[in-house]
Amino acid sequence: MSGGKEEKLGRKGRAAVVVLGDFGRSPRMQYHALSLARQASVEVDIVAYGAFYSPLCYLREPVHSYSHNGTVSKQWPAIPRIVSKIFYPMVLLFKALFQFFTLFWFLCVKIPSPDVFIVQNPPSVPTLVAVKWASWLRNSAFIVDWHNFGYTLLGLSLGRSSHYVALYHWFEKYYGKAANGSLCVTRAMQHELAQNWGIKATVLYDQPPEFFRPTSIEEKHKLFCRLHKDLCHPPGVHDCVSAGTMELWNQDIDETLFTSKVDANIFLKPNRPALVVSSTSWTPDEDFSLLLEAAVMYDRRVAAILNEDGLTKEEVLWKETNNGKEILYPRLLFIITGKGPNKEKYEEKIRRLKLNRVAFRTMWLSAEDYPLLLGSADLGICLHTSSSGLDLPMKVFVVEFLQQLKLNAVVDMFGCGLPVCAVSYSCIEELVKAEKNGLLFSSSSELANELLMLFKGFPDNCDVLKSLRNGVMEVGSSARWDTEWERHAKPLISKVIYGEL
């Protein structure tokens, strides 16, 4: 064994996790940091933008953050929409140069010398260039975690035929091949990297960490108490949820929209709305209009089935909560979590909808409340599609061409025992098993049909929904991030650092 390897084996290792984006919206890289500290027993430095509250708050191991709120310079300002297409590529070029020198300074000067850099891709330029040069100067290894292909994302704004996209592709391929090791998110991407890029990658599927789990009835009640005002009385909103909860405004915490507490017993209300959750980064690769159109279809079809055409939302609510009869289809409350560039655009569209049985709430939740909400919901919706067709929904989780950073939407939902309806594309079936743990759809009409099928007889007689939830629990009980990381990522990292097999 060489003297360098002996020296590395004789001391505690060190890794740098690099994200040229908001670290709070990159759960996969957060989980890498957690696992490096806990499972590989190395010290971890994080070089990233942002300081959003993240699952790292659960960590007690040595993780050091270098963010723009601490020592890293602020992010490049958003490019105004009025900038013409002629100047847009030039602005991207200057932005890449600015980010390169800033990132290179931090990797070479600001942080201690690591044994390995683990870098998220995309963005590829200038990230891979800066990390490769820094790893050479500091005699470190570097591993690329391929979430998607950066050139395909740039092609969304400039067009696939652009010379800038071709140049970006060259940089991504050249510096991607220069890495000491690679991880990727799907077998389809692994095949693409091997066949057309000459890169051997290890598949590391996204899996939920241990704090994503089904929510107990007590936790649900406490959560809905905390969220009561946001759910039932958002400013300027009057819909089928807010109209029926005015009497709860001044009551004590024994009753919420979904739960009631009698003495020491908590139970779910039989006339509660069905809770549907979708996590989004409000970016172009998530067509939110699909969900809005499906919601309108559900509302209109249920009105026709229940002979409610012409009724106001108050009359619909009274019919559901006061006539003592079981309602065939419930009200739906969609909670949309996340932040992003298209959020205000779709919020305005939501405000213009005229719905009697459907309501929407847009929220940003803390790291503690987000898993609890998923574990309290009845169904998850994933609208993510892929620019390359080779990645899976990663919350997926933002600005300009960094919008590919997704919250781990579907993965987190499965961890909480929540079945999912997801947009169908080429490799989504590696994650969502149709009619086993979820359903797939390609249009708003298909999604509306699935909502009608799943929620017919809610809450007690919706057999298809219960079957999907059982399927999620069967698969999810054995699939966790720690297990996946130990089996696939840790051997690669140990091999790269220490030369171990």
Image: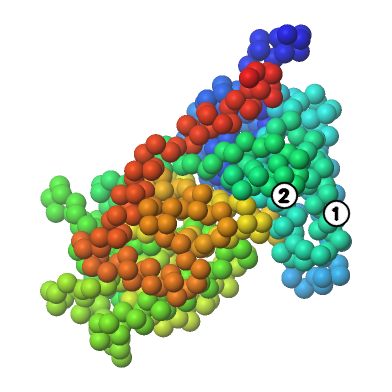
- Cα distance between the residues tagged 2 and 1: 14 Å
Q: Nearer the viewer, mark 2 or mark 1?
A: 1
Q: Quadrant of residue 281?
A: bottom right
Q: Is residue 415 left or right of residue 160?
A: left
Q: Is residue 327 left or right of residue 352?
A: left
Q: Amino acid at mark 2?
A: Pro
Which residue is found at the position 80% from the left and 25% from the top? 138
Secondary-structure class at tag 1: helix
Q: In the image shown, does 399 or 421 lie closer to the viewer?
A: 421
Res 386 visible: yes
Q: Quadrant of residue 378?
A: bottom left
Q: In the image shown, does 430 or 329 lie closer to the viewer?
A: 430
Q: Amino acid at mark 1?
A: Leu
Percent position (x, y) of residue 474? 34, 43
Which residue is found at the position 69% from the left and 14% from the top? 8
**Whether residue 109 is situated above or below residue 254 in the rendered picture:** above
**Whether residue 6 is situated above or below residue 453 in the rendered picture:** above
Disc 2 target residue: 123
Q: Quadrant of the C terminus?
A: top right
**Whether residue 42 is situated above or below residue 392 in the rendered picture:** above
Disc 1 target residue: 167
Which residue is found at the position 68% from the left and 18% from the top? 498
**What mark, if any, has residue 395 been given in the picture?**
none
Q: Residues within 10 Å of mark 1 (few under 14, many from 20)?
A: few
Which residue is found at the position 64% from the left and 43% from the top? 190
Q: Residues within 10 Å of mark 2 (few under 14, many from 20)?
A: many
Q: Quadrant of the N terminus?
A: top right
